Image: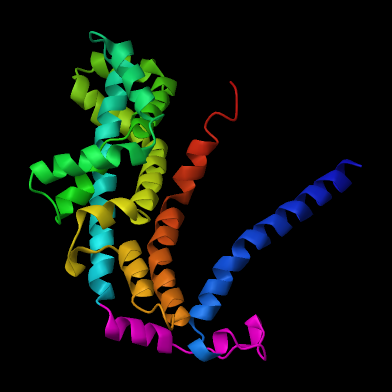
Amino acid sequence: MKRAIYLIAYIILIITALSMLFPFFAMIILAFTSNDAIFSNSNSLFSLKITTENFNHVFSNLPITKYFFNSLFVALFTTLGQVSIASLAGFAFSRLNFKYKSFWFTVIIITMMVPPQVNIIPLFFLIKELHLINTYFAMILPGLFGGFGVFLMKQYFDSLPKELEDAAKIDGCNIFQIFFKVDLPLALPACVTLAIFTFVTTWNSFMWPLIVTNTDSMRTLPVALAAFKGSFREITLWGDLLACSVVCTIPVILIFLAGKKYFLQNLLAGGVKE
């Protein structure tokens, strides 16, 4: 009876996974299909003729390498900045004692409840006053701090045994050495998890880069993709759009595969009680 239940559960999970993966595989297949064949009724999805003309057209007619560099540059520096700041802040809230500690942590938690769209107008005027419009700083600075990152790192540092820090203090380590040599290496799964979330969120960001950039050379891939579609309103080149979408998807898949081990380790960290 138990085996039958497990078998049914696995079948349901496999069907659900396939239904979620099908649009992704369809996007890849159609990206390698000519525009004329995409909406042809005479061909099924798995019998289409493979061609690279969509990718050739995109790379020859669009500065997609520039867009790719802009997205990668912004996403990498935002990720590095947020992981660094969140790690330091999380360690401070977890291990240090200072005035109004609970109050400031509560304020950080409250910021997680504020929709990001609410901050767009004041952030835009702040960036404008700093004369950073249409620069990389405009796209990177607002993403360096996040309440979720501080909360995640603080909770992870709370779960680490303090005996290791006490041993480090006996060996003569100061607070910075304890952070960099003891706690931070142990918090690697949390850092990788935060890095994956931050990278994916920044890479897929559309509204903020659209608002703070006004030249083609500063566009990121999502903004360029939307502009590309808008430039062909009468005849939409769906094959080219799908080719751009595949290019947009590759870094996200790679960053997840690179950090999958630590990401899953962090998700399962509280699954076993000692």
Q: What residue appears at the point 55 percent right and 78 percent down from the top-left corner?
A: 29
Residue placed most toward the observer, 174 or 208: 208
Say left or right for 226 vs 62: right
Q: Is residue 34 visible?
A: no
Q: Pinpoint residue 81: horizontal percent, then vertical percent.
A: 23, 42
Residue placed most toward the observer, 179 or 16: 16
Q: Pinpoint residue 217: horizontal percent, then vertical percent.
A: 18, 68
- Tell whether position 273 is magenta: no
Q: Pinpoint residue 8: horizontal percent, then vertical percent.
A: 82, 50
Q: Is residue 31 visible?
A: yes
- Tell whether position 44 is magenta: yes
Say left or right for 187 vs 265: left
State which quarter of the image contains the C terminus.
Answer: top right
Q: Quadrant of residue 223?
A: bottom left
Q: Is residue 78 above or below residue 101?
A: below
Q: What coloring was used for the rendering?
A: rainbow
Q: Pinpoint residue 214: horizontal percent, then vertical percent.
A: 18, 61
Q: Is residue 98 above or below residue 188?
A: above
Q: What residue appears at the point 50 percent right and 40 percent down from the top-left corner?
A: 265
Q: What residue appears at the point 48 percent right and 37 percent down from the top-left corner?
A: 266
State which quarter of the image contains the N terminus.
Answer: top right
Residue placed most toward the observer, 206 or 102: 206
The furthest residue to the front: 234
Number of numbered markers: 0
The furthest residue to the right: 1
Q: Is residue 80 above or below residue 165?
A: below
Segment colored magenta: 37-62
